[in-house]
Amino acid sequence: MLENLQPNRVFHYFEELTKIPRESGNEQAVSDYLYHLGKELGYETIQDEANNIIIRKPAHPDYMDHEPIIIQGHMDMVAEKAEGIKHDFAKDPIPLAVEGDWVKTKGTTLGADDGIAVAMGLAIIEDKEAKHPALELLVTTDEETTMSGARAVKKENIRGKKLINIDAEEEGILLAGCSGGHNLIGKQKLKYQARQLKNTFELTINNMLGGHSGMEIHQKRGNSIKFALQAMNLIKEVSDYELVSIVGGSKHNAIPRDARVVFASDEEDYSIDFTNLIAKYPLDKDMQVTIKKIDNIDEVLSAQSQENIEQFTAEVPHGVYSMMEEYPDIVECSNNLAIFDIQDRQLKVTISLRSSNPESFDKHTENVTKIYQKNGFDVIEADYYQAWEFAKESSLRETALEAFKETFNKEMKVEVVHAALEPAVFTDTFPEMEMIAVGPTMKDVHSPNERLSISSTERTFKFINKLLEKL
């Protein structure tokens, strides 16, 4: 599918990666592929206990006295698919499509986040004639969930002191810092009672835009869980209801696109016009909202459990909490109301909270925790990662800016991003390491609308090679 695209070897390796299952937590096959490829290329290759891969390529003869450089990305991807798409991420290849300047898919996430970094790294180390210092291609696991791969990288396995992370999503922007964050997980044992009302219905919300909960949280994309409660408020204007369940979302770092509410009512049918409510979400133009009668369910939630869920969903914030004072266009603190899941009569809610400011991080964590507790939840904090702080001085950053200017005759922007990047984790293990993050233009990552710019990939690859030559 991608054989005619340039850079040819980058897209060759990217397409190979799309054939291998690599959802977070299911990376053994792709880790083995990378390990064997490194060995086939004749390089020293390490596969550690976390299935991280390190491939070492010797320096070009002209660069023998230069310090080694690390090229880094992650092998896992977010596995999301559109409603009605039959795709098994555990075995099915990603269905690719090319449309104009974009590599896209047919109803699933693409995995350009961060397969394109791996593909670029492989294309660079494969090229025996490329001029650069010794390279270490570091490919980590589980970045999209716990960053456990990055946490497991051992200091003794890494020789370089300058790291180029290829996990940014906009060409021409160099990331030099990122927010920290954690998940706030609330659990509540639900109580049930016999259904009193006559019929059982299912409300479904599908195909909201979704997207990355850090990179796109400021764009006012709709949250399907929040929308579900607002829709139920319109239903309540018609008649009382008894709540059976509410579920939605699937990934802590993806804005939820779909939700499903089951409830009981004495109505025989509903003809509610959701047009005005939908109009409040102009970005979610493909949203679908339906109500249908289903087979009766004998038990509904108790009045207290229903009230807890409704009050919590109404009160808990979703979206931007504050903007950075130094960079007023960049989000400082936010949270994503990410997942409602009911298993074994227990509701589990996951909220992903991000901040580059310790004060706002603590304040907002306390606020969300109180809302949880007020509405009957037990709360735990999980998967904490610290912020990657902006370095006032960095020779790597300055060289990258020079390389970009020389390559394209224009300035590269420097930003701090409101998202989790692995350099934040590496600051613990490698406190003296200089790091930057760059990448080609991608859109709507973590959603079935994810797409990768072909021309931007070619330009970014050219820039990275130029940077390596200057190092």
Image: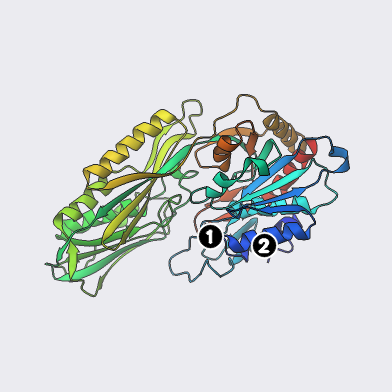
Q: Name the residue under label 2.
A: 33
Q: Is residue 245 left or right of residue 57?
A: left
Residue under the image location 53 percent in, 60 percent down:
23
Mark closest to the chain's N terminus, 2 or 1: 1
Q: Tag 1, which secondary structure?
A: loop
Q: In this view, does 131 lie to the left or right of 332?
A: right
Q: In front here: 241 or 39?
A: 39
* Direction left: furthest residue: 196
Q: What is the crowding at mark 2: few (fewer than 14 residues within 10 Å), some, or many (at least 20)?
A: some
- 452 w.r.t. 89: above or below: above
Q: In this view, does 236 lie to the left or right of 363?
A: left
Q: In front here: 44 or 78?
A: 44
CA gap, disc 2 and disc 1: 15 Å
Mark 2 or mark 1, which is nearer to you?
Answer: 2
- Tell me the kind of residue under disc 2: Tyr
Where does residue 212 sit, x and y in percent of width and height? 48, 49
Q: In front here: 74 or 236?
A: 74
Residue under the image location 73 percent in, 43 percent down:
464
Where does residue 45 sit, x and y in percent of width and height? 72, 53
